[in-house]
Amino acid sequence: MGFLPVRIRSWRAGDEALLAEAGPQISPASLRARFLAGTPRLPEAYLRRIARLPRDTWDAKVALRGDPHTDQVVGWAEFVRLGGGAGPGSAGPGETEADFAILVLDSWQRRGVGRALVRSLLPRAAAAGIRTLHADIDPGNEAARRLLAAVLGRDRLTGRFMDGLLHYTMRLD
């Protein structure tokens, strides 16, 4: 893959504004692949939600280009804990499971950004006590399917059709 001209870092307070700035660079097809619904732009409710969720419930890694004073988001990978945000050690069905999603701006797709984001997010999720990630993917999204298989390996990844989507379960152990 060679040199990747982006930096990957942990989510910081205020990064939702960087996502909103990047929004016009995301095609309706990429938004549909990420949110599994037709939406013309990043949903404002989503941006508000991720801004207020505690980091032990929702967290992300962001890919940025530019210097630290002019950061521009080119992608992000995120997880949200299942079970209403129960943290590690608390009672609840989702304490060790989380939904997983990724979005890379169209002009940065197929350049290794997604792979770098996923590889960066997996240790963070494991450190948060997540043992299993779940992702729902449109069956036609070959790029996402190949990405997960390449990063996780087929032995840690299972998929099944459910409600017209491919539901993947990914073990982190």
Image (cartoon, rainbow, N blue to C red):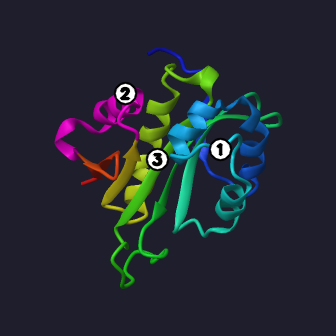
Closest to the observer, 153 or 40: 40
Q: Residue at x 83, y 37 (%)?
A: 69
Q: Which mark is residue 121?
A: 3
The residue segment tinted magenta is 138-159
Q: Residue at x 68, y 54 (%)?
A: 12
- Kindly identify which residue carries mark 1: 39
Is disc 3 placed on a helix, strand or loop?
helix
Q: Position of residue 169 (x, y in %)?
A: 28, 52
Picture quarter with the C terminus:
bottom left
Q: Position of residue 110 (x, y in %)?
A: 49, 20
**For the view shown, which residue lies furthest in the bottom direction?**
91
**Mark toward the viewer: 2 or 1:** 1
Answer left or right for 95 relative to 16. left
**Mark toward the viewer: 1 or 3:** 1
- Kindly identify which residue carries mark 2: 142
Query: As displayed, is residue 48 above or below residue 8?
Result: below
Identify the mark nearer the N-term, 2 or 1: 1
Q: Quadrant of residue 26?
A: top right
